[in-house]
């Protein structure tokens, strides 16, 4: 007998036994239910068959197919079976794959449900849903299964993972730039006198010096204005192709929501080329000596995040209770603590306004 025929018989036995209450069902981890809860609530387009059911708070109220599967071994057999259905129906479903159609994902999830992901910038009509569902149901009927769980969910096209050392066009904050024999981290996009550009570290940045991103083959212009260490350590490069994102991790580059000056006790993030996204607390407001400009810069801030050479210029920011990015300054050095300039003084020195 074929594997799926054997599994069908086993499943039928599970169903019969469960009617007499002797099988309680496989105990899935709560974490697994929560991990996919939004597929069954917030992003659900349509559901068919014996699917899990959640309440309005995202709590599981009916485990669906899982309550009919007695143990872990049977659960993995069900995973194998749904995988086989995907393999056998893919040739029919493929004609609906993006960009010819709205389907951008096709598989099965941890709860044993066949899952069809629909591009969230497109719509899917009922006829298309019925056709795809028909392919799946027909394949399941070959094993006498009539209530196979299927969901259609809305989701975005995947963002490709990227590195800080990649070429970024538009240029964003938190990525590598080169100036002469030095490299640093871009701060954030800003406008000055109606022109767009990118803020970088002020040390080693003389007006007119060429700037590249990420290396010598990728010119983004020249240093337009420097703070000269008056109230901050920052410079600005006029460049039209910039955007108001901050590189945080390879999979996420959040938008800037706004800006404000820091305060002692604030938990901040410094996002640098070498150290990555490094968390710390603002611990001191102080005047601080800057060896490049050979002067003491007033009203700078110390924080205890980790940094390293190459992080200079990196954006320093915090996230509000809605996880939105608010800029508070630019990292420039390290003494006992890491040092950054507050954003209001950078704005005053350079005559810029952050983009958001």
Image: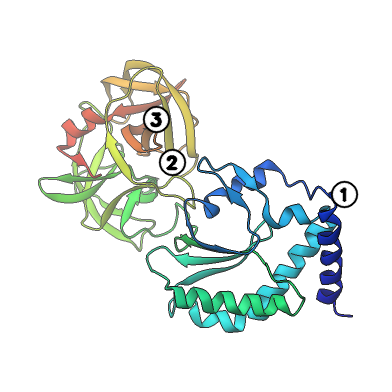
Q: Report how far apart the C-alphas of labels 3 and 1 lie in the structure.
A: 67 Å
Dot 2 falls on a residue whose secondary structure is strand
Q: Report how far apart the C-alphas of labels 2 and 1 lie in the structure.
A: 58 Å
Dot 1 falls on a residue whose secondary structure is loop
Residue plotted at (64% across, 75% down): 137
Quarter of the N terminus within the rendering: bottom right
Question: Are the residues tagged 2 and 1 within 8 Å (C-beta)?
Answer: no
Question: Is label 3 or label 2 in front?
Answer: 2
Task: Determine which residue is flagged by label 1.
Answer: 22
Label of residue 333 in the image: 3
Question: From the viewer's perspective, is residue 111 above or below residue 128?
Answer: above
State the residue in front, 247 or 48: 48
Residue 41: x %, y % from top left: 51, 51
Residue closest to the far front: 20
Q: Can residue 137 be seen in this view?
A: yes
Decide which of tag 2 and tag 1 comes sooner along the chain.
1
Within the image, what quadrant is residue 89 found in? Answer: bottom right
Residue 159: x %, y % from top left: 46, 60
Decide which of tag 3 and tag 2 comes sooner along the chain.
2
Task: Determine which residue is flagged by label 2.
Answer: 272
Question: Are the residues tagged 3 and 1 within 8 Å (C-beta)?
Answer: no
Residue plotted at (87% across, 49% down): 22
Within the image, what quadrant is residue 269 found in? Answer: top left
Residue closest to the far right: 1
Question: Is label 2 or label 1 in front?
Answer: 1
Question: From the viewer's perspective, is residue 47 above or below residue 308?
Answer: below
């Amino acid at each position: 007998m074929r594997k799926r025929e054997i599994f069908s018989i086993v499943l039928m036995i599970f169903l019969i036994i469960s009617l007499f209450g002797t099988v309680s069902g496989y105990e899935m981890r709560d974490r697994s239910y929560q991990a996919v809860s939004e597929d069954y609530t917030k992003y659900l387009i349509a559901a068919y068959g014996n699917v899990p059911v959640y309440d309005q708070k995202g709590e599981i109220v009916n485990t669906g197919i899982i309550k009919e599967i007695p143990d872990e071994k049977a659960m993995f057999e069900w995973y194998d079976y749904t995988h086989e259905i995907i393999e056998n129906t893919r040739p029919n479903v493929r004609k609906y794959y993006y960009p010819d159609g709205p389907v951008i994902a096709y598989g099965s999830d941890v709860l044993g449900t066949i899952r069809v992901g629909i591009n969230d910038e497109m719509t899917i009509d009922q006829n298309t849903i019925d056709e795809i569902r028909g392919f799946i149901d027909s394949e399941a009927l070959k094993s006498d299964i009539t209530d196979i769980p299927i969901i259609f969910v809305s989701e975005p096209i995947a963002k490709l993972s990227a590195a800080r050392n990649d070429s970024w066009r538009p240029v964003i904050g938190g990525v590598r730039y080169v100036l002469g024999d030095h490299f640093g981290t871009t701060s954030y996009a800003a406008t000055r006198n109606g022109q767009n550009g990118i803020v970088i570290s002020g040390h080693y940045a003389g007006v007119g010096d060429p700037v590249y991103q990420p290396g010598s083959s990728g010119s983004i212009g020249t240093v337009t204005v420097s703070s000269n260490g008056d109230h901050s350590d920052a410079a600005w490069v006029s460049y039209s192709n910039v955007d108001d994102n901050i590189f945080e991790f390879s999979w996420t580059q959040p938008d800037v929501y706004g800006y404000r000056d820091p305060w002692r006790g604030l938990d901040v993030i410094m996002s640098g080329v070498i150290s990555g996204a490094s968390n710390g607390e603002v611990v001191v407001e102080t005047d601080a000596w800057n060896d490049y400009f050979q002067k003491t810069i007033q009203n700078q801030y110390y924080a205890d995040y980790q940094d390293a050479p190459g992080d200079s210029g990196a954006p320093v920011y915090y996230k509000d209770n809605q996880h939105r990015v608010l800029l508070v300054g630019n990292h420039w050095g390290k003494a006992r603590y890491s040092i950054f300039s507050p954003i209001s003084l950078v704005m005053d020195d350079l005559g810029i306004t952050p983009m958001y």
